[in-house]
Image: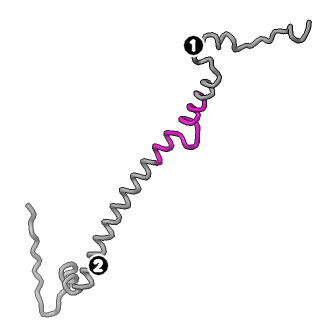
Amino acid sequence: MALGDRKVLNPFKPLVNKLPTGFRNRVFLILAIFIVWMLVFDKASVYTQYKLSRTVNRLQNDKIYYQNQIKEVEAQHQDMENNAEKFARERYFMKTNDEDVFVIDKLSK
């Protein structure tokens, strides 16, 4: 027997023959494996990108919320500095010795 006469047995040949002809192409198989790898197993997979985008959106909403809170606190602080006596009287019911304090709550309907 010469070297050229020997037949190499491929154990996957029956499996490959069952595939449609378009899927037998090596380029297609490599491309399919690459796409599956990128979609599922890669560090930057679709699922990971989705989670990261959700986190970014949540953090942006938190940033807007806290910026609004900072503005409100700064306005309160400015009001307190400008009207310290009014703030103390209204908030902590402070009074002088010869005064009487009456608290009137407005009922909201």
Residue furthest bottom in the image: 98
Q: Does the magenta run of residues contain 54?
A: no
How crowded is the residue under tag 2: few (<14 C-alpha within 10 Å), some, or many (20+)? few
Disc 2, SS:
helix
Query: From the viewer's perspective, is 88 left or right of 19?
Result: left
Q: Secondary structure at mark 1?
A: loop
Image-quadrant location for residue 24: top right
Residue 28: quadrant of the picture: top right
The amino acid pointed to by label 1 is Pro
State the quadrant of the C terminus.
bottom left
Question: For residue 59, what is the image quadrant?
Answer: bottom left
Camera-nearest residue between 47 and 17: 17
Q: Position of residue 66 (x, y in %)?
A: 35, 64
Check whether the beta carbons of the residues at disc 1 and disc 2 lie within 8 A of each other: no
**Mark 1 surroundings: few (<14), some (14-19) or many (≥20) residues within 10 A:** few
How far, Cα to Cα, is label 1 from label 2?
Answer: 74 Å
In this picture, residue 28 sits left or right of residue 105: right
Mark 1 or 2, nearer chain start:
1
Q: Which residue is mark 1?
A: 20
Residue at screen point 10% across, 63% down:
108
Dominant SS type (magenta): helix
Q: Is residue 37 magenta?
A: yes
Task: Give whichever of 34, 62 is nearer the camera.
Answer: 34
Classify the position of the N terminus by image quarter.
Answer: top right
Looking at numbered disc 2 in the image, what kind of residue is underneath it? His
Pair 1/2: label in front: 1
The magenta segment is 32-52
- Which mark is drawn over residue 77? 2
Residue 74: image location, x then y, percent: 30, 75
Q: Is residue 83 above or below residue 59?
A: below
